Amino acid sequence: MTMNTPISQYIIIVIISGVLNVLLAIYAYYNKSKFAGLKLFMWSTLLSAVYTFAFAFELASDSLGEILFWIKIEYLGMPFISIFSLLLIMHYVGIERFNTPKKAWGLFVIPAITLLMVLTNDFHHLFYKEVFLRPNVDTPMVEVVPGLWYYVHGSYTSGSMYVSLFILGRYWRKKKTIYRKQMITLAIGVALPMLGALSYTLGLTPMGMDPVPVIMCVTSILYVTAIFSTALLTVAPIAREHIFESMRDGVLVLNLENQIMDFNGAATQIIPALTPLAIGQKLDHIWKRGAESEAFSFDVDPTTEHEQEFKWIRGGETFYYRIRASKLLKPNGQLAGRTIVMIDVTEHTLLQNKLRHLAEIDGLTAIYNRTFFMEKSRQLLLSAHQRQQPCSFILFDIDHFKLINDRYGHSVGDFALQHVVSICQQTLPASALFGRYGGEEFAIGLPNTKLEQAGQIAENLRAAIESNPLYSSAKALTITASFGVNQARAPVVPLETLLSEADVALYRSKHNGRNCVHLHEQDSIHAIEAKKPY
């Protein structure tokens, strides 16, 4: 047989089709863990390879005996291809009813009988009534007279293909654009061989040869293109039926490679970069192109389940979300990927922050209230003892505050408290704890500060308060304050004792004419020299 004859060229194309099917089967084998449908695709392409290679050998045979032998080999693969394609498409759209060995075996009964009929045709002639060589042709080619089971087999195969196309058509509107591209690929992969088989049955093919193996070369190229352009069969809507577009929570479905498999409408509101083109892309790539958020990254390990919260800034507004990652399992219990649920907890978080603010902050002066100041001071004291660093406390209150309230009214008294707090915040070091201890009395915690240093800080505060009068509608009101200072000693001395001793020093300042600072030492209380601001 020369290489420039139509038959030889036809054989070459058929062999190319077989090679492509082998390559696709190998690809499916090594990637079958990504999507259960790849196992079905592997068997479909492997059986297609058996069919096409055997058909190539049939065309190259020199005798009727060789041709009949390769026809039998062809039927080791050909009757089962349409059934594996049907199961693949059912799995793709989420119809799992027949995708278990116990339920799927019934679909293979007719193909198995077809194989048996072909292998034993010499005894009953139910598949081929007669097989003979065509007369007046240069290359040996066979003609067949179909038997009863030939029509049963053809009807069953065609029916399987029609069902596959019907399923794809039915689910067309339910899928996103990227899935429609995949569905078109699958539909063409079914429709072209079906049309080829129909044209062969009607005697419309060149030289009366079966065009299906050549068509498989086209569909194989189409599959290869779709696998790399739309992640065909590695990104599939296996969880689509379980995600409702009406959900308020954003939902992402990821495969084992951390690629986005699907998402709902709420997720697109949270992550603007989620478009149909995001299907098949890594989640981290899409996340980085989203809105501004705090430092956050998803755990890329699909075997872990975790929950965490993050802050997301979108359009100038701040939102808070709780991220919940859960395993996504196949019906057989194997890991298929994971779902990421993004729950909007903005309202809850803002309320929680408000309650925390109310629990920690004094409403009038916006500094720590007494309860929270005491809590933070105990932590400060413990840290100072652990690090073996000094720690001091200051108590002070506003002189003659009752007189300010009585003479000018409580509103001016409130302004006086806020005025003093503002001066202290501008004067105190950044590390200081500052709280309202009660009424017009305030407390200050100073980490890594010795008694003399704390006394100097208190003196600076006293001078700043005195030299910055409160300007009201009535007049400029000069405010002064009296201070008591104490330093933490042994760890056994509790915070309450230290503040009580600072309070004793404060009252010594009041009894000594007010507007001054007294230090409490272990055995005595003494005043520091006031440095008047002039």
Image: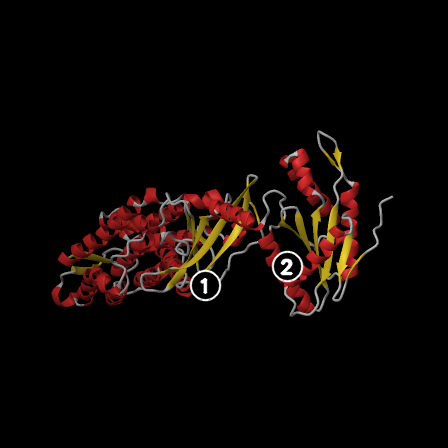
Residue projecting furthest to the top? 473
Q: According to the image, label 2 marks what residue?
A: 377
Q: Where is residue 303 in the image (x, y as percent from the top left)?
A: 44, 64
Question: What residue do we see at 69% from left, 68% from top?
Answer: 387
First in sequence, mark 2 or 1: give its number.
1
Nearer to the camera, 315 or 243: 315
Q: Where is residue 415 in the image (x, y as percent from the top left)?
A: 66, 38
Q: How many marks?
A: 2
Q: Which colour scheme is used?
A: secondary structure
Q: Which amino acid does label 2 sit on?
A: Ser
Nearer to the camera, 417 or 207: 417
Q: Quadrant of the N terminus?
A: bottom left
Q: Is residue 369 left or right of residue 489?
A: left
Nearer to the camera, 160 or 7: 160
Nearer to the camera, 219 or 96: 96
Q: Is mark 2 on a helix, strand or loop?
A: helix
Is residue 205 at all visible to an observer of this figure?
A: no
Q: Which amino acid does label 1 sit on?
A: Thr
Question: What residue do we see at 59% from left, 54% from top?
Answer: 372
Q: Where is residue 123 in the image (x, y as percent from the top left)?
A: 13, 68
Q: Nearer the viewer, mark 2 or mark 1?
A: 2
Q: Is residue 193 left or right of residue 2?
A: left
Is residue 444 at all visible to an observer of this figure?
A: yes
Q: Residue 304 carries which label?
A: 1
Q: What element carries label 1?
A: loop
CA gap, disc 2 to disc 1? Answer: 39 Å
- Circles 2, 1 touching at the beta carbon (< 8 Å): no
Question: What residue do we see at 70% from left, 51% from top?
Answer: 396
Residue projecting furthest to the front? 511
Q: In which quarter of the image is the C terminus?
A: top right
What is the quadrant of residue 381 in the picture? bottom right
